[in-house]
Amino acid sequence: MIRALSKVESRPEGAGSRNEDGRRMPVEPEVREVPNTIREDEMAAEAGSPRRPRRSREEVCQALVEAAAALLAERASGRVTVRAIAARADVNPALVHRYFGAKQRLIRAAMEKAQRTITTEIDEMADVLQGAEDVFRTTLAEKEFIAFLARASLDGVLSDLPAGNPALRRLVERFEAEGEERGTRGRHDPHVVVACLSYLVMGYALFGQFIRRGTGLDGEPDETVEAAIVEIMRDMAGSAIHE
């Protein structure tokens, strides 16, 4: 809270005490503290920018996470500053430190959000074969997350990111569980199959248009090409649970 000192008017002439000669003694103006709470929208207005609509903590955090994901997909992680993230989210930079503590925690939150979305889709699919299309579509929707991982790899900072991937780990678990239920051992290890499926989806998300032009598929509708990809994914998935 910022507190401003405000002067009040002097007491009217005639007020105050007199000295021994009967002359009035000068009266110093009173000074009192006036609380002045400046909200984020008022700070923006004083800086000459439009007032920000008041948002809840959850809304501010979501805006920051989305802004971080977008910026990390656009530029090297070392060039993504707290101030840049706050500006993209239209949030006071101080709130980044208040809600996340440090930029790395915000980056972790952005990664975890994308992984939770994909993991939820994996948990809800009926089985790994029929659920291939849903997982494919959901993963493609997280292009910013995939672009961020690609940029981090090219920048040589991938090892600095949080280890592990809950979505991939959960998909491996689904393959193993369904193989046990069927009582069969697939031709390929589920870990290898999940890795290949991930390469396929993430590669298509990043380089789909480039690869389609190079292979003569650029004239085909997206729906046709992606439906064929899903069928290939089902064949690959089946190799982990079928002999």
Image (cartoon, helix red, strand yellow):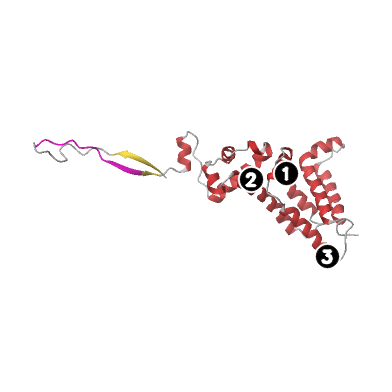
Q: Earlier in the sequence, mark 2 or mark 1?
A: 2
Q: Nearer the viewer, residue 194 or 219?
A: 194
Q: How many marks?
A: 3
Q: Is residue 73 left or right of residue 58?
A: right
Is residue 31 a member of the stretch shown in magenta? yes
* Residue 234, horizontal then vertical, whole percent: 84, 53
Q: Is residue 111 above or below residue 214?
A: below
Name the secondary structure under disc 2. helix
Q: Earlier in the sequence, mark 1 or mark 3?
A: 1
Q: Earlier in the sequence, mark 3 or mark 2?
A: 2
The disc placed on residue 180 is: 3
Quadrant position of residue 146? top right
What residue is pinned by disc 1? 146
Answer few, some or many: residues within 10 Å of disc 2's Cα (few below 14, many 20 plus, some between 14 and 19).
Answer: many
Answer few, some or many: residues within 10 Å of disc 1's Cα (few below 14, many 20 plus, some between 14 and 19).
Answer: many
Quadrant position of residue 239? bottom right
Q: CA distance from mark 2 to mark 1?
A: 13 Å
Of the 4 image quadrants, the one containing the N terminus is top left
Is residue 26 a member of the stretch shown in magenta? yes
The magenta segment: 22-34
What residue is pinned by disc 2? 107
Q: Is residue 228 left or right of residue 87?
A: right
Q: Is residue 198 visible?
A: yes
* Residue 2, horizontal then vertical, whole percent: 41, 42
What amino acid is found at the position of numbered circle 2 in the picture? Ile
